[in-house]
Image (cartoon, rainbow, N blue to C red):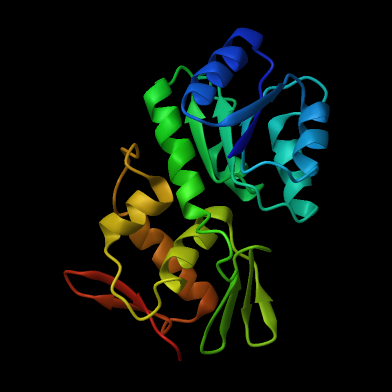
């Protein structure tokens, strides 16, 4: 698989590239946002590691431009620890996950592999239909009947995990592992918050709570 690193700290970028190549990935590196957007727009990458504070164009703008152009490549954002990163803003621009510097290289590799797993096997159908709900995982669009419903990146990720397993009971722990992955150390009740938001946007009857077990997405 081919990865693109967009990071202006050259020593960090080259260190990450060297480590990821040792893991078996093909890696390209650029050091500013304009070059990053150009390279990522070529569509040859399976994942982009994107710093936020970049010369030329910051990571938020790069991410938003890629999503606006229809590119669904997974994006892992990197940020310094000084608080310039706002998780909601980053995810709402279309990022799939983020890491705060300094981070463990082991955690970075785990996040990269988790994002690549979520992308699903090659050739899998990107469109899932359950009743009057249609989820296009390639275009990242959701429809109820003929009407499109706009979701944030995390809302979409939760819904996607439920819709690909429609009819099955999916545990809260499974959703956390799939959407936030094992490194998440926040409140596990965050899953309930996102399920509640999805119910508000898509209808209360779509996602059923199975007491003590998890959630099940059902046709209505």
Q: Is residue 129 visible?
A: yes
Q: Residue at x 76, y 56 (%)?
A: 70
Q: Is residue 59 above or below residue 127?
A: above
Give percent across and percent down for residue 154.
51, 54
In the image, taking residue 44 as reference, residue 163 lies left or right, namely: left
Q: Is residue 52 visible?
A: no
State the count of labels: 0
Q: Residue at x 39, y 60 (%)?
A: 193
In the image, taking residue 126 as reference, residue 147 lies left or right, namely: right
In this view, the residue in front, 145 or 11, is 11
The single residue placed furthest to the top in the displayed view is 11
In the image, taking residue 56 as reference, residue 118 lies left or right, namely: left
Give percent across and percent down for residue 68.
78, 53
In this view, the residue in front, 58 or 204, is 58
Q: Residue at x 68, y 63 (%)?
A: 139
Give percent across and percent down for residue 162.
41, 69
Residue 18 lies in quadrant:
top right
Residue 33 lies in quadrant:
top right
Which corner quadrant holds the N terminus?
top right
Which corner quadrant holds the C terminus?
bottom left
Q: Is residue 38 above or below residue 181?
A: above
């Amino acid at each position: 698989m081919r990865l693109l690193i967009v990071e202006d700290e050259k020593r960090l970028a080259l260190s990450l590239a060297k480590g990821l190549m040792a893991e078996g990935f093909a890696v390209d590196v650029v050091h500013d946002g304009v070059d990053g957007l150009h390279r990522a727009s070529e569509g040859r990458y399976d994942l982009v590691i994107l710093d936020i504070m970049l010369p030329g164009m910051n990571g938020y703008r790069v991410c938003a431009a890629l999503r606006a152009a229809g590119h669904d490549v997974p994006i892992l954002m990197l940020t310094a620890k000084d608080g310039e990163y706002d998780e909601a803003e980053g995810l709402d621009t279309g990022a799939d996950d983020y890491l705060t510097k300094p981070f463990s290289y082991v955690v970075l590799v785990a996040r990269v592999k988790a994002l690549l797993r979520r992308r699903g096997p090659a050739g899998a159908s990107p469109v899932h239909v359950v009743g009057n709900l249609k989820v296009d995982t390639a275009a990242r669009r959701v429809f109820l009947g003929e009407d499109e419903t706009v979701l944030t990146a995390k809302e979409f990720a939760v819904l996607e995990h439920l819709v690909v397993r429609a009819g099955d009971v999916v545990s809260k722990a499974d959703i956390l592992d799939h959407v936030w992955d094992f490194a998440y150390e926040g409140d596990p009740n965050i899953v309930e918050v996102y399920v509640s938001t999805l119910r508000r946007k898509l209808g209360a009857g779509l996602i059923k709570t199975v007491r003590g077990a998890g959630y099940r997405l059902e046709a209505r």
